[in-house]
Structures are given as C-alpha cells and as structure tokens.
Amino acid sequence: MADFQEQLQRLQEQLQQAQAQLNALPPPVPEPPPSVAAAAPEQADERAQIEARVRSQTSVAELQAQLIEALLENERLRRTLEEERQNHARTREGLITALGDALETLKQRRRSPKSP
C-alpha cells in the first residue's frame, strides 16, 4: 500500500510539472489563412490584391491602423445590415397587413348585395 501511495504521489508531481511546462510554452501559432487558390474564383483577384497590399506594408503601426479601419468599417456595415433587416421586417409586416385588409374588403364587397 505504501508503494502505491508513493507512486501516486510521484505521478501527481509529474503531472504538475508537465502542466507547469505546458503553461510556460508560448501560445500556438495560428494556422495561415487559406491560399488564394482556395478562395472562390471571383474573390481570388481581390484577395491577391489585398495580400499584396498587406505584404507591402513593413510597419506594424501601419498594419494596426489598417486593421482598426477595417474593424470600424465592419462594425458600421454590421449596424447598417441590422437596420436594413429591421426595415425589411417592418415593410413585410405592413404589406401583410395591407394584403389582409384588401382581402377583407374584397370579401365584404362580395357579400354585400349590389346596388342598382
């Protein structure tokens, strides 16, 4: 039983050491983005142009500035899209209501006797 306890203690210490070593490692390097060839044909040209522009930038500050601009544009487009979705939903509801009203009016006209 004492051997088992000692072995368990050693294994726990080894596990702690391995976890400490793992925590000391730098974060994994992210996978590179898909190549231009993997992109859809209509996007391949645009992607190649963007990649060339990014690679031509040598300054981290310039790349950071471009990233900030891209993120701001992304957020602006997201808000615009959400606003457009809301407008579309309101338009759809209005059209459905108008169609319902028109059908109801048509039913009433068919039910009422025609005046001479």
Image (cartoon, grey):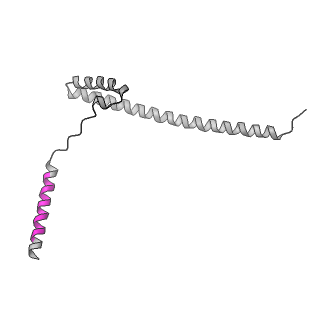
Q: Where 36 falls versus 4 (above or below)?
A: above
- Is residue 95 rendered to the left or right of residue 20? right
User: Where residue 43 appears, x then y in whole percent?
Assistant: 35, 27
Report the residue at 42% width, 31% height from top: 77
Q: In which quarter of the image is the C terminus?
A: top right
Q: In this view, does 6 lie above or below 114?
A: below
Magenta stretch holds residue 5: no
Residue 18 painted magenta: yes
Instruction: State the image coordinates of residue 50 (x, y, percent, origin top left).
Output: 29, 25
Seen in the picture, residue 52 relative to 1 is either above or below; the reply is above
Q: Nearer the viewer, residue 111 or 97?
A: 111
Q: Position of residue 34 (x, y in %)?
A: 28, 34
Q: In which quarter of the image is the N terminus?
A: bottom left
Q: In this view, does 100 lie above or below 37?
A: below
Outermost residue, bottom direction?
Answer: 1
Q: Residue 17's quadrant in the figure? A: bottom left
Determine the image quadrant of residue 52. Answer: top left
What is the quadrant of residue 92 in the picture?
A: top right
Q: Front-most of 23 and 107? A: 107
Total labels: the figure holds: 0
Magenta segment, which residues?
6-21
Task: Report the residue that reaches farthest toward the right.
Answer: 116
Residue depicted at 10% across the width and 69% down the height: 7
> Which residue lies at the image location 11% right of the left edge and 67% below the top edge?
9
